[in-house]
Amino acid sequence: MSAIVLEKVYKTYHVGDQEIHALNGVDLRIERGEFASIIGPSGSGKSTMMHLLGCLDTPSKGKLEICGHDISSASSNALSGIRNREIGFVFQSFNLLARFNILENVELPLIYGGLTASERKKKAAAIIKTVGLEERMYNRPSQLSGGQCQRVAIARALVNDPEIILADEPTGNLDTATGQNILALFKDLHKSGRTVILVTHDPRIAATTPRVIEISDGKIVSGKT
Amino acid sequence: MSFFLCIEVALREIWAHRFRSLLSMMGIILGVSSLLTTMALTAGIEKGMRATLQQVGGLEGLEITDKELVGALQDFWSLSPGRTIEDARAIKASAPLISYVTPEIIFGAKVGTYGNGNADGYTITGCWPDYMQIKNHELAAGRFISDLDDEEGHHCAVIGATISQNLWPGKPPIEVLGNTIFINDIAFKVVGVFIRYERDYEKIREKTGSTKASAQRREKRGLITRPNARDPFSWKNQAVIIPYSTMFYEFRSGLFPDDSLYSYRMNALEIKVKDINFFDQALDQTRAAMNVTHRNVDDFAFNTKEDWVDRIDSSVKANQISGGIIAGISLLVGGIGIANIMLASISERVREIGIRRAVGARGRDIFLQILVESVAIATIGAVLGIFAGIALMQLFVMISPEQNSPILQFSSIFISVGFAILAGIISGIYPALKASRLDPITALRYE
C-alpha cells in the first residue's frame, strides 16, 4: 500500500474575485519507506502540496489518500486524528512552545493521542534520548541552539510513531554543518523504515534524497514515478 | 486533551501573565466581594429585625388596641366599657387557643434605693404573670410576679439588668434579690432580676473575652462608652414589673372617683396565640369573648406583627435587589474584562494554536483549553473576591449599627462563586470559539 496517493488533485484559492490555481491536476504516488524531496521555486504550489500531504488542508478536487485514509472530504476532526497518528511535522522555524520545556514539547502530540501522564513521559523521554538530548530534557527551547531545537522538533514528530515524516525546509534556519547533521538524522529515519518527505527550494538538499519531485506552476515537472 | 491537563495549562498561562491576569480578574473580584457583602449585610439586617421581633414576643404575640368608632356607630361608644381587666379575664376563661393574656398599666416614675439615686424616666409596668411569656422574658435570679402577688396586691417588683446595675453596681443578680426599691417613693421588694438581653454575637464576644472594637476605639480617643449606648433591647433591660393590682391601687386609683380595678381602662392588653397555625381561629375566639364584655360594640382591634414580618421581607428583598444589581453589573464588567483579555491572549498565541493543531489537536481541544483558562481566571478572581468580601465585611462590622452587623453565609459564598464561574464560562465562549475556528495553516504561518 502506498503511503501517499494523489489522483488529479486540484487546489484553488479565491483571493477577492481572482482564482488562484495552486495545484493543477497533480498525480503522485509515494510508497511506504521512500525518502523523497519536493522541490520548486516559491509560488510553484510547493507549500500547498505540503499542506495537503500534511492533512492541514483538503483538495478542491481530486482524490487524496494518506496511509489508506481518504482525506479528500474528511472532516476537520478526522484530519486532526490523522495528523496526530500518521504524520510528524518538522518546520523551518522549529515551532516549539516557548513556555514549555523540552519534555513537554515532545509530549504534545501524545496529549492529543489520549495517553496517561506516566505513559507520555516514558515515551517522550525515550525519543529524546534517541536524538541525544536527554541532558536538556527540562530546559526551555530558548536555552537550546538551533540544531538542538530542530532535534527536539524531530523528536516531537517521531513520538507518536507516525508513518510519514514531513519536513518543511528543515535546514533553512541552520548553518551548513548543523544542517548536514539534521539531514543525516533524516537519512537514519529513512533507514529505520519511515517515509520521509523533505520540502525545500534548495537543489543541493534535494540532491541528497533518492527521489526528487519537482513542482512548477502547480504541476509535477519531474520525479512523478 | 484531558480536563486536568487543561487546568494545568491554563494555570501556567495565567501565572505567566500574572499581572495581566490579576487586572482582568478585578471585575470578578469586585463583583464577588460586593455580592458577598450585600448578602451578608442583608442577612444581618434581617437577623437584626427578626431578633427584635422575637424580643417583643414573636409573631404569636399581639396587642389588642382601641379602635375609634366612626359615623353613626359613635353613638354606641358609651355602651362599651372599653378595654378593662374584664376583657383579660374573659379571654383567659373562654379563648382556649390563647395561651397567655395580660392587661397592662404603664407609667413613668422615679426609681431609686434608700439613699441612692432617684432617677426619673423609668417605665413601670403593672401586669399579670403571663407578661413574662408574652414578652419572652428570662430571669437571671429570683422569680417573676405570681398570681398570689396580684391577688393580694404585694409590693414586689422584677427589674431589668440595667436597673440592677445602676442601683447596685457590681452586685450579681442573686444578691440584688430581697433589696428594696422605691418607685415614686413607695417601697417594693425585688423578687426577681432579668437576664441582660443582647444579641447573639455579643454573647459570643463576651464568652471569648474580646471587647467590642467600637468600644476600644472610643476608649483610645478618650471617650467614655455608656453601657447602653446602642443597646437595642434597652426597653427590656430597663424594665420594672409589678403586679397589676398593686399598680392600680398604688398609682392609679382615686384619680377619678368612679374608677375601680374592674372598670379602669388599661393602657395595653396583650395576648399570645398558642399555635401560629390557628392564628385566625384564635383571633375569632378572642373577638367572641370580647364582644360579650364590650356589648357587641366594635371598639377594639388586633395589632398583629404580620405587617412587621412583611416589612422585614420587603426591606430584605429591596436590599437584595439593589445589591444584586450592583454585583450583577460588576460581574458583567468582569466577564467583559475576561473576554477582552482572552481575545488578546489568543491573538498572541495564534502560532501556538497552529502548532497544537498541527500535532493533532482538534478544534474542540482548543475550545476547551481557552474556555478552561477563562473559567480559571474567573474562579481565581472569585476566590480573591471572597477574601476581599470578608475584609470588606470586617469594615462594615465596625461601622454599621450593631443590631445589623453583617452575617457571612456559606450559601452566599456558593452563590457568588457560581455566578463568577458562570461569567467566566459566558465570557470564554466567544474567544474559545474564535480560537477553535482558526485555520491551522494560517495559524502556523502567523508571525
Image (cartoon, rainbow, N blue to C red):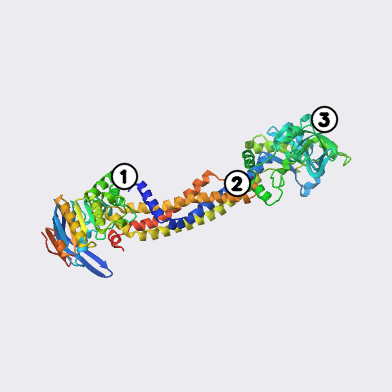
Q: CA distance from mark 3 to mark 1?
A: 89 Å
The spot of residue B430 in percent (x, y) is 39, 57
What kind of element bears circle 1?
helix
The tag earlier along the polypeptide, 3 or 2, is 2
Viewer-nearest of discs 3 and 1:
1
Question: Which residue is the site of mark 1?
Answer: A117
Q: Hey, what amino acid is under mark 1?
A: Ala
Q: Which label belongs to residue B82?
A: none
What kind of element bears circle 2?
helix
Question: Which residue is the site of mark 2?
Answer: B44
Q: Hey, what amino acid is under mark 3?
A: Glu
Q: Which label belongs to residue B152?
A: 3
Screen quadrant of the C terminus of chain A:
bottom left
Viewer-nearest of discs 2 and 1:
1
In the foreground, B330 or B73: B330
Q: Chain of mark 1?
A: A
Residue at image position (15%, 64%) is A203
In the foreground, B194 or A102: A102
The spot of residue A140 in percent (x, y) is 32, 54
